Image (cartoon, rainbow, N blue to C red):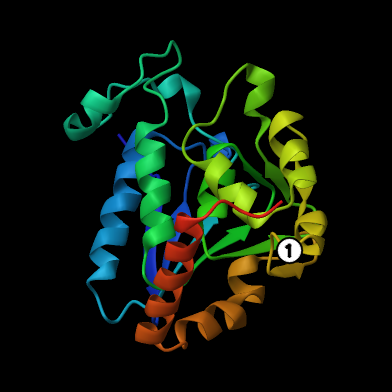
């Protein structure tokens, strides 16, 4: 019997650590085991001086279309069970919150290479990264309001510091996604490429540029910026 392929593909390209979601038949929907593996991978990479940048991407037709709502809460690690929220669809956002916090606080550059769909939990991952690279036709957003859900992993804190209120209401209160071209125009994305591009190839020069930045200076600057954001509410 053939073993199932790994849900995450971890590889190195010089100083760049690639984390690739590998459930293309489910548009890379995330489950608790994948979150845990990402957390463990980031923690290990933070202690490895040879790793200077982390790049997230997805196999197949999408970056990530969201969370696997059928996954339930059985695989949530024991250390997090006191913080679980009892929901019919699973355990609530406790593990998603932990992984997006680990992404946001990773000391070096973290970039999301977004194509196809970056929705729900995929959008949470992307907005936790320092940089977002997109194809023109990528769809980014949070459709959870249409399922009578409210995302509590921290988006209301992050996105109000990234975008003006008009865009945040479109994304979260109306559940209307942005295209990659729109995200680039309003500053949510940092590089824009044609539809159908293989971002791991076409954006490779940008990713390597991130890896070449001085590690200690980047980490100190990032920590100072996040610390300042954490001390104040954004000015309207």
Total labels: the figure holds 1
Q: Can residue 4 be seen?
A: no
| Vertical side of 218 occupied by 173: above or below | above
> Residue 131: percent from the left, percent from the top?
58, 66
Figure check: 165 above or below 174:
below
Taking depth in this image into account, of 200 and 49 the one nearest to the observer is: 49
Query: Where does the image place residue 177, in percent across and percent down from the top left?
Result: 75, 40
Residue located beneath label 1 in the image: 187
Would you say 182 lies left or right of 104 here? right
Dot 1 falls on a residue whose secondary structure is loop
Q: Which of the two residues, 210 or 13, is positioned nearer the viewer here?
A: 210
* Residue drawn at the location 36% of the way across and 54% of the way down: 102
Which residue lies at the image location 38% right of the left edge and 60% below the top edge? 105
Q: Is residue 121 left or right of residue 7?
A: right
25 vs 17, left or right, is right
User: Percent position (x, y) of residue 166?
Assistant: 80, 44
Q: Residues within 10 Å of mark 1 (few under 14, many from 20)?
A: few
Q: Quadrant of the N terminus?
A: top left
């Amino acid at each position: 019997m053939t073993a199932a392929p790994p849900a995450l593909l971890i590889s190195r390209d010089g100083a760049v650590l690639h984390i690739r979601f590998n459930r293309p038949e489910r548009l890379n929907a995330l489950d608790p085991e994948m979150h845990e593996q990402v957390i463990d991978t980031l923690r290990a990479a933070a202690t490895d001086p040879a790793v200077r940048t982390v790049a997230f991407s997805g196999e197949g037709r999408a970056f990530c279309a969201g969370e696997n709502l059928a996954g339930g809460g059985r695989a949530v690690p024991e250390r997090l069970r006191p913080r679980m929220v009892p929901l019919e669809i699973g355990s609530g956002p406790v593990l998603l919150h932990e992984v997006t916090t680990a992404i946001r606080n990773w000391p070096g550059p973290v970039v999301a290479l977004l194509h196809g769909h970056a929705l729900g939990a995929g959008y949470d991952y992307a907005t936790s990264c320092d940089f977002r690279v997109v194809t023109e036709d990528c769809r980014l957003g949070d459709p959870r309001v249409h399922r009578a859900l409210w995302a509590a992993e921290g988006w209301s804190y992050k996105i109000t510091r990234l975008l003006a209120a008009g865009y945040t209401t479109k994304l979260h209160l109306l559940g209307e996604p942005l295209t990659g071209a729109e995200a680039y125009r309003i500053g949510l994305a940092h590089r824009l490429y044609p539809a159908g591009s293989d971002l791991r190839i076409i954006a490779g020069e940008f990713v390597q540029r991130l890896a070449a930045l001085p590690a200690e200076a980047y980490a100190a600057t990032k920590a100072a910026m996040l610390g300042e954001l954490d001390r104040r509410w954004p000015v309207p």
